[in-house]
Amino acid sequence: MYSGTTQIRVRYGETDQMGYLYYGFYALYYEVGRAELIRELGYTYRELEEMGIMMPVVELNAQYFRPALYDNLITVKTILKELPEGPKIKFHSELYNEQGELLNKGVTTLVFYDPKEKKKVEMPDELKHRLEKYFTKKTDE
């Protein structure tokens, strides 16, 4: 498992009339978490794109438990629960308020995509090697 956290303050323009974070912005918060997790591995989305890899979202699922409110500092926890096999990668996201209460969780599935060839491809080897150490099972000797 590989995970990381980042924080985002709910801005006024992201809220509805009740002062709640508008539901559509949760996907944007997931994206911020994904981008930061990839950055922690030593990459940026831009660098992946320069390597010829795009990562479009192909599926998004979200569950809402309690609202994020205007001016709340939200902790976005992003988790890779399994080492990707094939062209798909699943990011699990959990959003917490300042009291540590779970507000929302979601799963975003992306694919590694070569825009020149117009087809799905495997995760770049260099990225896979950086992730493998977090998924290696330790055995008792």
Image (tube, rainbow, N blue to C red):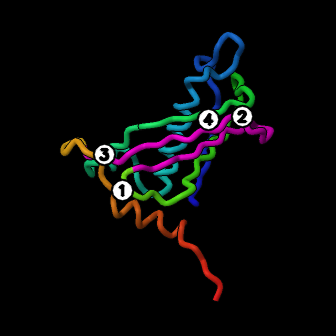
The one of 140 and 4 positioned closer to us in this rendering: 140
Residue receiving disc 2: 103
Residue receiving disc 3: 113
Residue receiving disc 1: 123
Quadrant housing the N terminus: bottom right
The three-letter amino acid code for the residue at tag 4 is Ile
Q: Residue at x 59, y 54 (%)?
A: 3
Q: How far separated are the C-alphas under marks 4 and 1?
A: 28 Å
Q: Is residue 97 magenta?
A: yes
The three-letter amino acid code for the residue at tag 2 is Leu
The image shows residue 21 at horizontal and vertical percentages of: 65, 23
Q: Residue at x 37, y 52 (%)?
A: 87
Badge 4 crowding class, 10 Å Cα cut-off, few under 14, some 14 to 19, many 20 or more, is some
Label 3 sits on a secondary structure element that is: strand
Mark 3 or mark 2: name the one nearer the start of the chain: 2
Q: How many marks?
A: 4
Q: Which residues are magenta?
A: 88-114
Mark 2 or mark 4: name the one nearer the start of the chain: 4
Label 4 sits on a secondary structure element that is: strand
- Please identify the quarter of the rendering in which residue 129 is found: bottom left
Q: How far separated are the C-alphas under marks 3 and 1?
A: 9 Å
The image shows residue 81 at horizontal and vertical percentages of: 57, 56
Task: Classify residue 1 as left or right of residue 110.
Answer: right
Residue receiving disc 4: 8
